[in-house]
Amino acid sequence: MGAALALAERGRGRTAPNPNVGCVIVDDAGRVVGRCWTQPGGRPHAEAMALAEAGERARGATAYVTLEPCAHVSTRGPACSDSLIAAGVTRVVAGIEDPDPRTAGSGFARLREAGVAVTAGVRAEDARRSMAGFLTRLALGRPFVTLKLATSLDGCIAMADGTSRWITGAESRAHAHLERSRHEAILVGRGTYEADAPRLDVRLPGLEERSPERVILSTRPHPSGAARLPPSPAGRGKMLLKAAKGEGGWLSIPSPQAIIDLPADHLLVEGGAQTAAAFLRADLVDRLLLYRAPILIGGGKPGIADVGLSDLSAAHGRWRLADARRLGVDRLEVYERASCLPASSPTSAPSAASNSAATRES
Amino acid sequence: MGAALALAERGRGRTAPNPNVGCVIVDDAGRVVGRCWTQPGGRPHAEAMALAEAGERARGATAYVTLEPCAHVSTRGPACSDSLIAAGVTRVVAGIEDPDPRTAGSGFARLREAGVAVTAGVRAEDARRSMAGFLTRLALGRPFVTLKLATSLDGCIAMADGTSRWITGAESRAHAHLERSRHEAILVGRGTYEADAPRLDVRLPGLEERSPERVILSTRPHPSGAARLPPSPAGRGKMLLKAAKGEGGWLSIPSPQAIIDLPADHLLVEGGAQTAAAFLRADLVDRLLLYRAPILIGGGKPGIADVGLSDLSAAHGRWRLADARRLGVDRLEVYERASCLPASSPTSAPSAASNSAATRES
Ligand SMILES: NC(=O)c1ccc[n+]([C@@H]2O[C@H](COP(=O)([O-])OP(=O)(O)OC[C@H]3O[C@@H](n4cnc5c(N)ncnc54)[C@H](OP(=O)(O)O)[C@@H]3O)[C@@H](O)[C@H]2O)c1
Ligand SMILES: NC(=O)c1ccc[n+]([C@@H]2O[C@H](COP(=O)([O-])OP(=O)(O)OC[C@H]3O[C@@H](n4cnc5c(N)ncnc54)[C@H](OP(=O)(O)O)[C@@H]3O)[C@@H](O)[C@H]2O)c1
């Protein structure tokens, strides 16, 4: 399952509107005979690819898959649960049940009816984390939002005069580019867009093609170089997006809530301070990526503007450490919501969710 | 040596002007026959206490000691190197050489002349860290300075309205009190003194007696409740201090540089932002204690005011992570100078060092 989860990461940020699934098939001698992940655009599914690789060797084998195999036939392919049965797989070990109403347990049921042994819920939390984009879209109708901050030990994102090159080191910046490659969209506030003219692309060898769509947060209808994202959940699809973008290749949205219209399951917010505060105030941040350099700036620019906190106790219990590691001399900390999803979403969840399920085309 | 280093910690902040040494004596069957640390006030020395515990069992034993045994006789006791020889110890394993000019290698030499096997430099870096107060006083004529900050993830020490109770949790606060107990003196700026009227004592069961002397940083000659510390390195001694304190039991100093006059080898600076910046600007911070709660404040009070940083590159290479751990849901990070001691000290090092050596009474 660990291997399947690692494979699933390869698809993160590229499979929308489908989930990024990983699959490993192991024969009864313990040999790996097939391994794959959901392909860009959401098809073929991970199971279909892994079964194709395994061929006849799938007979009697065990399939490890991060999500319940689907139970619905699509124009783009058969149901994975049927394919697994047809290939002669005798055991399926799965991460989580697929919340998509077209599957939602019926994939497991179909496998069991055919005599396949099913073990579900294996490394469920990791599977949920791995597919957070898909799950958030399905439950709340909006992308999963990561807020990134690169700061000094005293929490500054720049010197008082605005200088911010460089606070963090090369290892941190490479890691931040890898994170970018796993997001369909990246957003900055108009202040940062105009001050820094950031490229926001992925500058890692071999991953240059995976730069996310660039989005500006601005109340202005037409920030220069950008065009307003059309407000339509049905508009989620690369083709439509390309037409919508402004001359500079940027989109713009008028409020944090408008992320509901983004054709993305993963949104990376890269500042500045007002923008970070706007997303936090709207309770639209699911994950924090904190890159911290071992320096003190003193009297520099804080990373987050006023979020309207009423009292300190209201700030507690909100974040849970998910990962901490060194990156060169810097440190990275990843925090997640202490509860899996926000209690209530400012974007109207139920209707959005049904929209979303309707537009998922897998 | 690990055990000796742990014992040495018990004396930290209580042995000035002597070093806080730890000693463990092990007989030839591997049994611990004596263990102790330098007692409050600096005498008896760790070796003397451990030898007393071991008695006849020291014959043929090995002594593990964090610092070179002293070679100078004092009115308060014989030289430890002589005592070890007289007790029949046949091997000494030591951390670092004693930089005190009265010993400085002659302790080891005397042991070797008497046929004792000496291994020096064992866990030297840990030994140096453990005796940083003593070593800083000897080299630079001033206390070792730790700056403590308790912040949110975004580096705030309070909400915009000044509320700071509580950012960090009970475990962090208990740890901070333990740190207080290992310092002879604790300092805040006049702003914090007047705003918070902090007690700055040690509120841990069994350690209440170990509250440090309280000091205010202020340019005013007479902050209410405090009296100016007399500027005299010879004044280092508890008796003189008690007379100097103001009605409120506080001392005050007019500048960060005036810490040279404090009868302390360890000074804990607890803020606020201006005071932290003043010590950093003067390059008088040796260690950072960062307690961070998993909360975001947004638009709160930053922990460090302007330190006069000229450019970002000047901030790099200055701090090295020495420890990182969880304290409940909070995290503690300890940073030290990347170089052992500042290249040049604003307090005139050579004369201070000779003063210091002269007043060390061990
Ligand atoms: N070191 C780093 O990691 C880093 C990262 C990013 C930025 N920075 C620095 O941060 C500075 C810019 O930060 P900033 O806080 O001034 O600006 P910002 O957050 O980048 O942009 C502020 C703008 O965002 C729009 N905005 C904010 N809240 C909104 C809301 N609720 N709804 C709609 N639009 C909203 C507004 O645009 P309109 O006025 O057009 O409505 C506002 O003027 C720059 O100096 C940049 O270099 C540093
Ligand atoms: N959460 C926490 O951990 C924490 C900790 C500490 C403080 N705080 C908060 O921080 C706030 C106070 O911070 P602050 O920055 O305003 O004040 P501060 O640093 O506590 O005190 C400022 C005063 O220190 C003196 N001072 C500063 N630099 C000096 C220098 N180089 N030489 C001599 N004296 C110097 C000056 O006193 P004179 O004007 O008398 O010369 C100055 O007015 C309070 O609201 C407090 O609650 C929070």
Image (spheres, coloured by chain):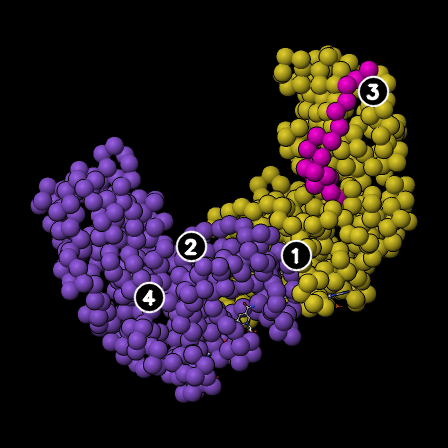
Chain colours: A purple, B yellow
Identity, as a three-letter code, of the amino acid under mark 3: Arg
Q: Is mark 1 within 8 Å of ligand 2?
A: yes
Circles 4 and 2 on the same chain: yes
Percent x, y of residue B193: 67, 62
Residue position marked by numbered label 4 in the rendering: A265
- Residue placed at 87% from the left, 46% from the top? B353
Using the image, name the chain to which the residue with label 2 belongs. Answer: A
Circles 2 and 1 on the same chain: no
Circles 4 and 1: CB atoms closer than 8 Å: no
Q: Secondary structure at mark 2?
A: strand
Viewer-side label of 3, 2: 3
Does B118 appear in magenta? yes
Residue position marked by numbered label 1 in the rendering: B270
Viewer-side label of 1, 3: 3
Q: Is residue A277 above or below residue A194?
A: above
Residue position marked by numbered label 2 in the rendering: A320
The quadrant holding residue A286 is: bottom left
Q: CA distance from mark 4 to mark 1?
A: 44 Å
Q: CA distance from mark 2 to mark 1?
A: 27 Å
